[in-house]
Image (cartoon, rainbow, N blue to C red):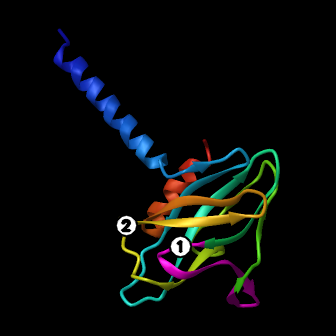
Amino acid sequence: MIKPITWLGVCVVSALSLVASVAIAHDVQTDAMRIAHPFATPTPPGASNGAAYVDITAFSDAVTLIGASSPASDTVELHEMQMDGDMMQMRHVNEIHVEAGETTTMRPGGGLHLMLIGLAEPLKEGERFPLTLTFAEQGDVDIEVWVQSAQEGSEAAEGHQHH
């Protein structure tokens, strides 16, 4: 007979394992790369644009993201935020190159992101939507994006960098 304290321990370990597996379940890995913790931030009602973020790690060869698409928006563009004097400027980029053995990190607040233009509906926390990333070398890679607060998404993504 299993003692109650042992049974409780088994239940706790099982629950923690399940939570950990769900937390990383939306990562995608191919032979060439890993796409870690794709997330988007919620948008206010009536917003027509949003942003999504991913971490892309290239393994033995470089990879180049050349496009993206999603049924959640009319268009998805690769964008970069940069300071131009005292002003933060957003600009479209044609590709995002990731060198072999390197990770490109996208986060809210600046730098690279995936701009969702012409949202079908506002992005609500807790929802998920499909996104297809197109790579020059790999072709299309389908991922699932989780809508999370900027802080929650960034913190969860940071945890993936140690895998």
User: Which comes before the other along the chain, label 1 or label 2?
Assistant: 1
13 vs 66: above or below: above
Quick check: 49 left or right of 44?
right
Tell me, yes or no, whether the two marked residues, 1 and 2, touch with CB atoms within 8 Å: no
> Foreground mark, 1 or 2?
1
Rendered residue at 73%/56% (across/down) = 138
Name the residue type under label 1.
Ser
| Quadrant of the frame with the C terminus | top right
Rendered residue at 50%/64% (across/down) = 39
Quick check: 19 left or right of 108?
left
| Magenta region includes residue 24 | no
Which of the pair 3/143 is nearer the observer? 143
Q: Which residue position is annotated with label 2?
A: 127
Task: Find the magenta span and give its range.
Answer: 69-90
Q: Quadrant of residue 80?
A: bottom right
Q: Which mark is residue 48?
A: none
Rendered residue at 37%/66% (across/down) = 127
Q: Which residue position is annotated with label 1?
A: 70
Rendered residue at 78%/48% (across/down) = 101
Q: CA distance from mark 1 to mark 2?
A: 14 Å
Question: Neighbour class for label 2 at 10 Å: few (<14), some, many (≥20)?
Answer: few
| Magenta region includes residue 81 | yes
Q: Quadrant of residue 7?
A: top left
